[in-house]
Image (cartoon, grey):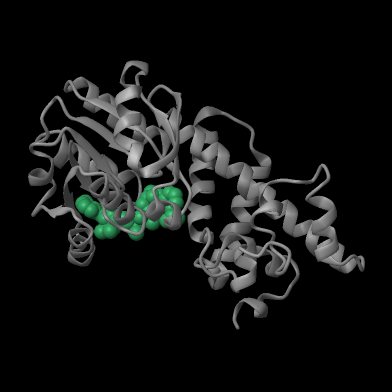
Amino acid sequence: MRVAFIGLGNMGGGMAANQAKAGRQVAAFDLSAQALERAQGAGCSPAPSVAQAVKDAQVVITMLPAGPHVRKVYAEDILPNAPKSALLIDCSTIDVESARAVAEQASAQGFRFADAPVSGGTAAADAGTLAFMVGCDEADFPEVEAAIGPMSRAVIRAGDHGAGQAAKICNNMVLGISMIGVCEAVAMAEKLGLDPERFFEIASKSSGQCWSISNYYPWPGPVETAPSNRGYAGGFATAMMLKDLKLAQQAAAAAGAATPMGAQAEGLYALFDRLGYGTKDFSGILQMLRGRLEELDG
Ligand code: NAD
């Protein structure tokens, strides 16, 4: 299979490498020469431009920062140069409106398109264990699933164009809200003289149980692999969570959905980011709620 891979950053680098590892011919392009070099080291063939990368592709995969990048690269580079038979898959996290606009443009020119954002961070991108939420025509899904195969542990069709992005921001809005809820409870437990480690034991087996408690408990100790045990480094960066919460608010406004808790979560993460902690894991917001930001500076 001939794959063109555009956008070889923190996520795309590992994803393109897994396409090459699966024996596919990967023509790769990124604006960054360093990223391109890394992809070459992982078995991809560097291309001098997007146009060159896509010209013989059977599948085009993009992993770009945000909506404006995706709109521009598709309109100016991919649609004018890829063969009409190519299956186009955008894995970036972008606004629903941009995903639908690009899908419409692609369909009008005879292409098949899927929005397929991912859940899982750079470790899952490197390991080929991302979860994909796909918005595409039902008939195209088996081919999308096969194309995504080497990068994934789960591929789920969310619905038609844009539904993949809708699923991603709805899921991450739950995550952002639930993490703040957990952090508030942990900070309150401490004030009430309840040991946060003992609270973990209880809440992880009670009705408060959720992903934020079981996997990313914000108090160091109980969950060995949680970012709280390494000074909130790595994990899911606050700036990334903020990006997804902003997309959720944008979508809610456009659709007329009431999301008051999502709006609160966005505001709190914006403040945490503004205070200089955008690169810390999003569970670090516990220290802001405790009034102990200095614990993040060590
Ligand atoms: P990144 O900034 O590391 O990578 C983006 C890459 O796109 C960069 O290497 C950049 O040079 C390249 N690029 C930008 N414009 C380009 C163009 N016109 N042509 C070719 N290359 C171009 O970002 P990332 O962390 O890899 O994230 C990519 C997407 O995945 C984002 O939408 C992000 O929200 C989403 N995402 C990230 C994570 C994560 O943990 N990092 C998790 C899930 C989803």
Residue 164 position in % (x across, y down) = 44, 32
Residue found at x 85% / y 67%? 190
Q: Is residue 1 above or below residue 51?
A: above
Q: Position of residue 89 (x, y in %)?
A: 29, 35
Q: Nearer the viewer, residue 35 or 94?
A: 35
- Say whether residue 76 is left or right of residue 62: left
Instruction: In the rendered view, tell whether residue 280 sits above or below residue 161.
Output: below
User: Can residue 101 be seen at all in this image of the molecule?
Assistant: no
Q: Residue at x 49, y 39 (%)?
A: 168
Q: Nearer the viewer, residue 49 or 35?
A: 35
Q: Is residue 233 left or right of residue 60?
A: right
Q: Quadrant of the C terminus?
A: bottom right
Instruction: Locate residue 206 relative to residue 239 in the image: left or right.
Output: right
Residue 212 visible at all: yes
Relative depth, front residue between 53 and 154: 154
Give percent across and percent down for residue 196.
82, 65
Q: Which residue lies at the image location 65% right of the left edge and 65% below the top edge?
A: 224
Q: Quadrant of ligand 1?
A: bottom left
Q: Quadrant of residue 230?
A: bottom right
The residue positioned farthest toward the top in the image shown: 139
Taking depth in this image into account, of 251 and 15 the one nearest to the observer is 15
| Residue 176 percent location from the top left of the image | 62, 49
Which quadrant, please, contains the N terminus?
top left
Picture layout, residue 180 above or below residue 149 = below
